[in-house]
Amino acid sequence: MEYLLLKGKQQINGTIKVNGAKNAAVAILPAALLTRETVEVDNLPKITDIDKIIQILKSLGAVVTCTGKRSISIDSSGVNSFCPPPSIVNKFRASYYFMGSLLGRFGQVEIPMPGGCNLGPRPIDQHVKGFTALGAEVELKHGIVKIKAKKLIGTHIYLDVVSVGATINIMLAAARAEGKTVIENAAREPEIVDVANFLNAMGAQVVGTGTDVIKIQGVQELGRAEHSVIPDRIEAGTFMIAAAATRGEALVADVIPKHLDSVIAKLREVGNEVEVGPDWVRVKGNSRLSPADVKTFPYPGFPTDLQAPMIVLLTQADGTSFVTENVFEERFNHLCELRKMGAKIKLGGRTAIIEGGHELSGAPVKALDLRGGAAFIIAGLISKGETRLEGVEHIDRGYEKIEERFKLLGVNIERRQQ
Ligand code: UD1
């Protein structure tokens, strides 16, 4: 078993280049199944979720070749199975993108319910609503979702919930459907725009991503494409919050600052200096931090994926802060462990009430999910004493060699084996 060991009272200081976006890459690779031609995808993060997607692609018959340090080519001409292996699918949430892509390619798919971080109930009813509206029959038997369509036909779909996964999955299934599909109340995340750019590079006709109405004119075939994944705004935000929480300074480079507007605004609101360049953001932490009211919302709201790191930052503010989770109502697994480190946090419904100004103390803690895990690193850095962080496998799903990344920012973290 691996764990991270870090000493407290360390300050972030340095420059870091952000990797490609996990949440875009995990949809783009399954989307490659929509064509029989070879596609090349660059700027992939080296994280375990991507390793698992590559394993699934290979198990379905695709030829995946490493073409560079961060790029692969995918030749799906030999893919002849629409049943991704349950043992891998079960392990992560984003495996649900094989529903849309295999349905689009073969008109059918058999796949177990996706696994992934436990953030409370994570239904897929809006995905199913979309597939059904496109003409598919969906049944769930013995934990396996079976989706089958004689023909996918474009239609109007109104999403009852703003869902990143459902928006992308419907785009994948509709790309080669007959006629036009309109998704209303679509999610607007930058990763959705990136997936659409990849689909369009293959010859799809998707317009309107980044707004809440997306139109997809189905085409018969998709072709070869090359694509470079956008920067990961959540990885960037994690380092920005870490700089602020440790009262350090970080130049976070190779980002699209517009994607970080809500994070930049909150960091400034609580008293940090944030300078914004064309493709970089510099955060300088202030010794005095004000409390804040933070509400997570779908993009362009404050990202739920940065809620846990933000709570850690607010434990250092002079006063009481309120953090309301509006996307995943039960996404507060991390509070228990943060309390072990001395954080004074109460939970009232979906709002965490954080009494700032108390020094945290290093402790043995366990990551229970991906982003909560990253938050414990920040908590360890500002604490007094040593923190031993277990559950690193959750962090490795979405952050590439996190200890190496933090070392680039001047802090000392070790990965050890037990
Ligand atoms: C994606 C991201 C995740 C991020 C989340 C919200 C990936 C792989 N993961 O997750 O990092 O935290 O967006 O930005 O991109 N919902 C339903 N029915 C559905 C689908 C969703 O009720 O069919 C609900 C969810 O329970 C949640 C909300 O809608 O309350 C938003 O979920 P969604 O945007 O779908 O999140 P994911 O795609 O799972």
Image (cartoon, rainbow, N blue to C red):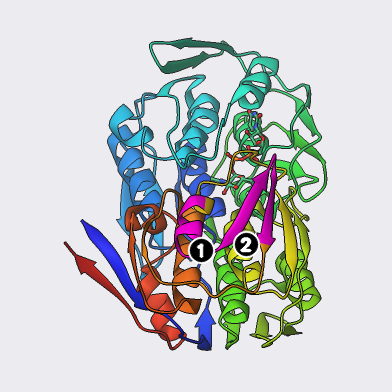
For the residue pair 383 and 245, the one nearer the viewer reads as 383
Q: Residue 121: x and y, percent?
A: 56, 30
For the residue pair 251 and 290, the one nearer the viewer reads as 290
User: The C terminus is located in which quarter?
Assistant: bottom left
The reply to whether dot 1 and dot 2 touch (C-beta < 8 Å) is: yes
Hey, what amino acid is under mark 2? Ile
Q: Is residue 357 visible?
A: yes
Residue 41 placement, left or right of 209: left
Residues shaded magenta? 336-354
Label 1 neighbourhood size at 10 Å, few (<14), some (14-19), many (20+)? many
At x 60%, y 51%, the residue is 198
Residue 85 placement, left or right of 199: left
Quarter assignment of residue 294: bottom right
Q: Secondary structure at mark 2?
A: helix
Label 2 neighbourhood size at 10 Å, few (<14), some (14-19), many (20+)? many
Disc sitting over residue 395 in the figure: none
Instruction: Determine the CA span between mark 1 and mark 2.
Output: 8 Å
At x 51%, y 85%, the residue is 12
Quarter of the picture for ligand 1? top right
For the residue pair 45 and 43, the one nearer the viewer reads as 45
344 in magenta: yes
Disc sitting over residue 375 in the figure: 1
Quarter assignment of residue 345: bottom right
Q: Secondary structure at mark 1?
A: helix
